[in-house]
Image (spheres, helix red, strand yellow):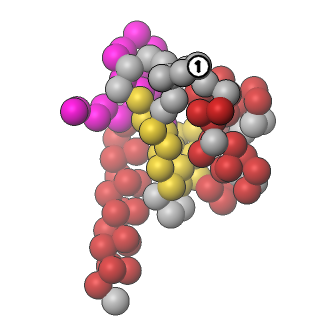
Amino acid sequence: MKSRLGFVSNSSSSSFLIEKKKVSAWQINGMKEHAEYAPLGEAWSVEDTGNFILAETPMDNFDLRWYAVVYLHIPEEFLIVNGAAMKRILATERQKERNDEDT
């Protein structure tokens, strides 16, 4: 399955990042547990990368951006939706993870 980075409104895939240090533990948990509020089969993949929360979906499902901003009160400017920025951040996170495994 292909994964596309960046939020695209009329697309079959969407994703965004949230920097964990900018949000509360309650908000982080709310992102991880969002499936409780999403219609059956419309939950996103939500991964804790260490410093960020990565949210991805292969199709337009439950509006997780709305949920994050309106329900969890995460300011929209905290959502990283730029594909190039996301790739750079995730590459850095994954390199840190590999370095940690090597030590």
Residue 58 in view (yes/no):
yes
Residue placed farthest to the bottom in the image? 103
Image x and y of residue 66, in percent: 65, 23
* 72 on left or right of 95: right
* 61 on left or right of 18: left
Residue 3: quarter of image? top left
Image x and y of residue 42, in percent: 50, 22
Residue placed farthest to the top in the image? 10
**At 53% from the left edge and 61% from the top edge, which residue is drawn?**
51
Secondary structure found at label 1: loop
Tell me the magenta residue range: 1-16
**Residue with the mark numbered 1:** 39
Residue 65: quarter of image? top right
**At 22% from the left edge and 33% from the top edge, which residue is drawn?**
1
Residue 82 in view (yes/no):
no
**At 54% from the left edge and 21% from the top edge, which residue is drawn?**
40
Magenta-highlighted stretch: main secondary structure?
loop
Q: Name the residue nearer the viewer: 16 or 29.
A: 29
Considering the image in quadrants, where does the C terminus appear?
bottom left
Q: Amino acid at mark 1?
A: Pro
Q: Is residue 62 above or below residue 47?
A: above
Q: Name the residue nearer the viewer: 98 or 79.
A: 98
Whether the magenta-drawn stretch holds residue 76 is answered as no
Q: Classify 10 Å Cα crowding around label 1: few (below 14), some (14-19), many (20 and above).
A: few
Image x and y of residue 68, in percent: 67, 33
| Picture mark count | 1
